Image (spheres, coloured by chain):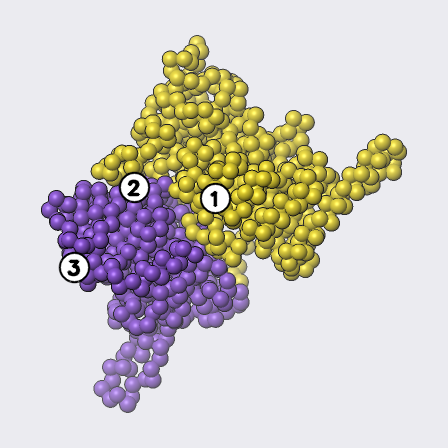
Amino acid sequence: MKTGLLLIFFLVSPAMAQLAVKARVVYPMTGDLAPLSDAVILCGPDGKIQQIGLAAGIPIPAGWPVVEAAVVVPGLIDARSTVGLSGVLNWERRDQEQLETSAPVQPELRAVDGYNGRDPLVAWLRELGVTTVHTGHAPGALVSGQTMVIKTNRASVVDANDLLAPVAGISVTLGSDGFAKNDKSAPGTRAKSVALLRAELIKAQEYLTKLQIADPSKHPDRDLHLEALASTLRREVPLIITADRHHDIAAALRLQKEFGFRLVLDSAAEAGLMLDEIKASQAAVIVHPTMARAVGERENLKFTTAADLLAAGIPFAFQSGHEDYVPKTRVVLFEAAMAAAHGLPPGQALAACTIRAAEILGLQQKIGSLEPGKDADLALYDGDPLETTTHCVGTIIDGRQVSRERR
Amino acid sequence: MPQTAEIRSSSLRMVMLSVPAGLLAAVMVGLAVEPAGLKEPVGREVDRPAVVRAFTGATLIPVSGPPVADGVMVVRDGRIESIGPRAEVVVPQGAEVVDCTGKVIIPGLICTHSHIGAPSGGDASAPMQPEARVLDAIDIRDPSVARARAGGVTTVNIMPGSGHLISGQTLYLKLRSGRTVEELAIRNDDGTLAGGLKMANGTNSLREAPFPGTRGKSAALVRQEFLKARDYQRKKAAAAAGDPATGPDRQLAMETLVEVLEGRRVVHHHTHRADDILTVLRLKEEFGFKVVLHHVSDAWQVADEIAAAGVGCSIINLDAPGGKLETRDLDWKNGAELERRGVVTAVHTDDPITDSRWMLRSAALSVRGGMSREKALESVTLAGARLLGLEARTGSLEPGKEADMVILSGDPLSIYTRVLETWVEGRLVFDVSRPADRLAAEGGPGAGQARWGGTCCFSR
């Protein structure tokens, strides 16, 4: 198909190493989030932003290709996804790698080993302006595995340079969505879930203690499972805890106090009931997709949750999340738009899928806003990006145009 | 428990102000529409349907004709009496005047494919169960029904699922505030309940025996069943003409299929892949039934054939393609491709696939795919009425029609627009300023009202 050929061309083409982008409105997503009118962004041969400012003050160097759009924002960041693992066909044991149910606690499962950068859903997000995804193992088991951060133009992961973060977090699910599936193995209750998780974290504590013994011959054998959990106790990697009911959120906060790991709350449908407690914990929230189905553990979700978190001063970002059926992936742009329709100021809605997401992922020095020295990742639109009827008209990653679709 | 956050209506207006208006707002046919009135209290006697009301000052979008700025619509006894510009419509003496200045009024939304009310049809015992009525399963107190009203939906076709070749009888409802499903049901002229027959092909109905395992078998089973219905129909007719005692025993399944054969019941046919769509058209040709194609993911690939067959389409827009092999090529351009060929096209929610509260957004996705704004708005109103055979009573704002309408804060296709009120037959069924309605519109603690049965005090 034409699309595929074009993409291959742009992905491999070394020709577009420098690029000027002109737009009537640019959201650099810096400071007070104010937009620039009639602005130019120069993307240097190193794939970084060289210069950004009003068009009047930035001459475009002779010979540079120029791309124009009505509105430009930083490349969108999906703060929690399963794309690349959860494929378009939804075909068990063929393109569904996001959830392994053979045991309740498997923190050793790496996201990179299940990731297919050529799945059509990755391209789908890219063509709508998403340049970076935090993807990996889905909620659905007590500890389902690891997550990672990758740009949406990396078709294959060969080494660590292809990733922005090889281990971005370890996914934990509290509440009934994390109960064991299709068998009688534990956990089947909330109390059992937390007891199991505490027991595992205590084992990891002991593993760390033994590693501190002076005599290396007395160290324990390497254990991928405990190593992964220990990395959260060392605060190198956060635990991303999916908790929707208020009492599951409380359980997550209790665990954080006991073990001292970095906590990122995921989904948090009933966060509105727990704003003071969440704020005190300093946890960030990757809020459920605004248009997630209001059923099961999320039956009390609220379209104003993002606005409530903003008002409470709790950092948050949007996610596409995981869908078992359709839409097989959601799009953070659309989730942000629906939040903007429910009380979140539009500028903040865009920030939550750009700079705020970068901050929560610890990547704000590299991506998330348009500033000199940062990666030249841009999303181009023919109008207000949050309007349903607007089109994404181009996507740029590392200074190269990776999509020219009008989507 | 914190109060529901106030809608920050001011933020609705600060949308990317710096972008030229022509690029952005492009409000319905160029009428400037400001979001307004989200917080105004409503002091109306909503339970007096006989009262005469005049809705004044709004931009009226009748769908059947061009929009009217600063319009007046008079509603009497649940029906639209007159509609037009302020200068041309006389507000009757004694009418209650409802000031809608700055707001937009559109016809009530019609969802041609919905599963609100937790319905079910046939069970796992057989692939074809036309005798199963969704009527007997709908819970009108399920939260999904109130949410649909909150989304501006006034008429729905409630369907059983797509896991059968024939999963049962569908039911057309008006979302009136009633206590029983019968109070919501739409009736045919002869007093029977209006509805269609749900059928499906493709992979959803391919299951373990006694279900078919292939597409060829699926079509053969359906053809044989309709041939049986023809025999049944003939024997009934023969008996009626001769000795009534010689007729066949009543068979609920056959009676339903005879209604289909006689054009008294429309087939609502789930179908995705291009070849499956053509299979439906082949069955329609053979048995001459009236059919509406539903979902129709590959419509853009066989749009000429669909147009030539003269059937209507009820399509879905999703935020991404896929979820199964046969929906891999789903495309937002379906609406545009069908519009170009003059096919009557509705956009549906398939709630819970898309929440009914996002129904207008679903229409906007068709605009994103190239459909005109006018046809997109028609796709969730008048086109739906046509596909359900209800266009004489609802689907547009015209004198004589039932007063089913939605009062919006602005452009129907803008994400920032909110449903303020929903009216069915002249009665207010949703008002965002009422706390219970606000809960249905936005969610929050208590919105779920888990109603499904559970076993207290046991864990597995």
Q: What's the residue at 44%, 9% (across, down)?
A: B93
Which color was chain A given? purple
**Residue A59 position in % (x across, y down):** 12, 49
Residue B334: which disc?
1
Packing grade of label 1 (10 A; few <14, some 14-19, many >=20) is many
**Residue B191 position in % (x across, y down):** 66, 28
* B313 lies left or right of A35: right
- Helix, strand, or loop for circle 3? loop
The amino acid at mark 1 is: Asn
Q: Given the image, what chain letter belongs to the residue carrying mark 3?
A: A
Q: What's the residue at 53%, 19% (across, down)?
A: B400
The amino acid at mark 3 is: Gly
Q: Given the image, what chain letter belongs to the residue carrying mark 1?
A: B
**Residue A31 position in % (x across, y down):** 16, 49
Which residue was labeled with disc 2?
Answer: A383
The foreground one among B379 and B437 is: B379
Measure the alpha-carbon separation of dots 2 and 1: 22 Å
Location of residue A220 (image quadrant): bottom left
Q: Given the image, what chain letter belongs to the residue carrying mark 2?
A: A
Measure the alpha-carbon separation of dots 3 and 1: 42 Å
Residue B304 seen in the figure? yes
The foreground one among B130 and A124 is: A124
Which color was chain B given? yellow
Measure the alpha-carbon separation of dots 3 and 2: 27 Å
- Helix, strand, or loop for circle 1? helix
The foreground one among A302 and A72 is: A72
